[in-house]
Image (cartoon, rainbow, N blue to C red):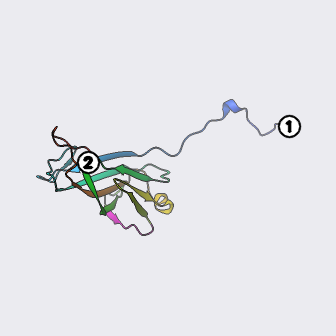
Amino acid sequence: MSNKGSYPLESASINAKNAVPIIDKQVQEDLGGQWGETNSADIGQDVNFRITIHVHDGAQDYILHDTMEEGFTFQENTVAVILRDGSSGVDSTITAAGNYTVETNGQTFKVIFFKDFCDSLNTNDRLIITYTAMLNGKAEIGNGTAEN
């Protein structure tokens, strides 16, 4: 029996090709329109959210999960996706057809990006997901904040 062409286990190494994407979530301030950490909305007012996924090489099976606090009513038909090209900085609106789907379950939703779409992504691209939720009467505002 020969082990010609085989290598001892201790000389093998594995380099992961798929990095975990960085995700940023921001809310749009209703007074000035800037994106940041906080907003000063009133009960009954729509609040815009933006989640940015920083893409890495080997993007696979990207699924964005978000759960609203009960003080927000998710507006299901407001989900939009923009692809910012990492090399040119150009934004393109991405339609759901063939690229992603949105699944909702009460206060939880997820954006599921299809394999072919993920395969087309490059390092430094950005997926920018925007959506709207209404601040409802269940919002805890006595302490000055309602989180999402």
Q: Residue at x 33, y 60 (%)?
A: 82
Name the residue carrying label 1: 2
Tell me if mark 2 has few (under 14), some (14-19) or many (20+) residues whose alpha carbon lies within 10 angstroms of its own: some
Please say whether residue 91 is visible from this viewpoint. no
Which circle marks residue 26 in the picture?
A: 2
The amino acid on which the numbered mark 1 sits, given as a three-letter code, is Ser
Q: Quadrant of the N terminus?
A: top right
Tell me if residue 94 is in the magenta stretch: yes
For discs 1 and 2, the disc positioned in front in the rendered view:
2
Q: Nearer the viewer, residue 123 or 26?
A: 26
Q: Secondary structure at mark 1?
A: loop
The amino acid on which the numbered mark 2 sits, given as a three-letter code, is Gln
Q: CA distance from mark 1 to mark 2?
A: 60 Å
Tell me if mark 1 has few (under 14), some (14-19) or many (20+) residues whose alpha carbon lies within 10 angstroms of its own: few
Q: Position of residue 113 (x, y in %)?
A: 44, 59
Q: Position of residue 83 (x, y in %)?
A: 35, 59
